[in-house]
Amino acid sequence: MSLLTSTAHHIRRPISALSALRCVRFESTTTQKPFYVTTPIFYVNAAPHLGHLHSTVLADLLKRWNQLLGRKAYMLTGTDEHGMKVQQVAQKAGKEPKALCDEISVTFKELAKAANISNDRFIRTTDPDHRIAAQKLWTILQDKGYIYKGKHDGWYCVSDETFYPDNQTQEVTDATTGLPKRISVETGKQVEWTSEENYFFRISKLKDRLLEFYEANPNFVTPKERYDEVKAEVATSSSDLSVSRPSSRFSWGIPVPGDSSQTIYVWLDALTNYLTAAGFAISDDIPMWPADVHIVGKDIIRFHAMYWPAFLLAADLPLPKKILAHAHWQMNGSKMSKSEGNVVDPFYLVELLDADAVRYYLLAHAVLEHDCSFSTESALKRRQSDLIGKYGNLFSRVTSKKFSLENAVKTFNLRFSGDRGAYESMQIERSESFLEKEAALIEDLDALPAKIIKRMEKTDTPGALNDIWAVLGAANKYCEEATPWRTSPINVVSTVYVVAEVCRVVSIILQPFLPEYSVRGLNHLGVHVDRRTIEYARFMADDAYGSDANNGKHLIRVIR
């Protein structure tokens, strides 16, 4: 049996990665709203840790993934710089709050750069346009009758920047002092009784509208466990929301418009950043809004899935399309926290592994529903076994100087478009079972884009990478069984081509997941830059690569 016979049925049928995904269609790129994805803005009371990097990598992945599918995309990240915690940390350090913010904010910028994050803006809540946007939103809410002044008595947590009702606190014994103290049931942080005059937001008036919205949009919050939590909390809530603090106690923030005695409460201030970046400060027409996905940690889901939609409903602004709440990374059995002393320095990790290897570990190891335990040893092992052992190894086989990839591409494509008779007469010295495995590998390769798109619809990054690495594993096994260096020239051509196609198609799909490795791989194969889109992620879709291949370091040597 010839290779032509074994694969002709496969090559002749129309295959399209996009049709397999039920033709994901986008509007003209000149008129369509960009896909808008955000991270939380990170609080500047401490240096960044692995959890911050995880949020940022997820957002970057979604941006790059949408770009691969042919859509314009915009990513926002930044720092949350107002609040009581920042004010207190600055006082203890003997610094002005702005100086402290400048110092810590730059470390988050540097981390994004070190991790090869493609954010379009790094926003700071001390930016002038953000102050305008926050005060504009306040004024709209006030003009619509949703903000009023009143007295607030309740339990306030400085660490969480949150007021808690009595039933969300409990009294415990301090393990250090042996004295009683009151803490938040949710976070375990200490709360203090506070009585002061504040402005309030009438979130109670929006309870029914929020619940109706959740019912109509069951995928608004993912995973479903978080969605159920949000619905339950809104259903049982009844009190309004404090949205300011007296400036005499809390001055490091944005003043309430028309009342300098009050400072806008940090969450109304902070959440507005998503509108600020969309142009809300300068225009009522904000074509990039609404956000397509807000990436958040599960500990701040209440603010994003309850308070933020309520503010937007009250202001008659569109709501974001999705809130994606990921779980936490743990060390020593608890969430990574600077105060707990169990954080992983992300800068050290990127230096140890490199940016793509860290991305791979975070995306392959973490799931949205459960907390994940971090291990440096595990990250190193996965780098060696998966990235070097399977992905890099396959490239080292096909880009060997023993073979001519350019000749393999030309010869194989000629077989199906030119002088077929010359090749049909050349029998491949392989068994029927081997040729069936070869055809199965090609089938799996062509099915891969549709599989990954379905995975990405649910942001199932471990599942997506498992699917990709299953094809890489099969291709490595195929190459070992084919032993092209021991057989006839036509076997060499066939094997090199099939393996090269796996490397090419997989690298196209991996561009959002591994932006550095995948580009190096495509460069090694000599794939033209304009042929790296999803339309080319199928077998025999590109007949013009290979001319610049086999002329540099193998990928296995690049992944050091």
Image (cartoon, rainbow, N blue to C red):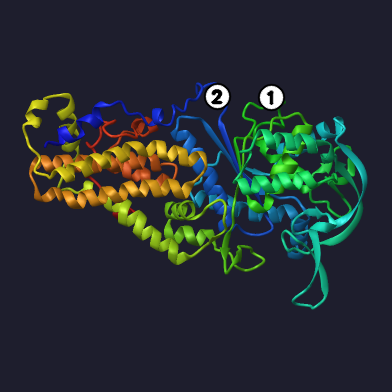
Q: Horizontal and vertical percent for residue 136?
A: 78, 33
Label 2 amino acid?
Answer: Gln
Label 1 amino acid?
Answer: Asp
Q: Label 1 crowding class (10 Å Cα cut-off): few <14, some 14-19, many 20+?
A: few
Quadrant in the picture for the N terminus: top left
Q: Label 2 crowding class (10 Å Cα cut-off): few <14, some 14-19, many 20+?
A: few
Give the camera-side residue of 97 and 77: 77
Helix, strand or loop for disc 2: loop
Q: Which mark is residue 285?
A: 1
Quadrant of residue 51 within the rendered picture: bottom right
Give the camera-side residue of 183 and 109: 183
Helix, strand or loop for disc 1: loop
Give the camera-side residue of 406 and 282: 406
Q: Residue at x 49, y 43 (%)?
A: 61
Q: Horizontal and vertical percent for residue 429?
A: 8, 43
Q: Horizontal and vertical percent for residue 403?
A: 15, 45
Q: Horizontal and vertical percent for residue 506?
A: 34, 42
Q: Which mark is residue 255?
A: none
Q: Mark 2 highlights which residue?
A: 32
> Vertical placement of 351 versus 518: above or below?
below
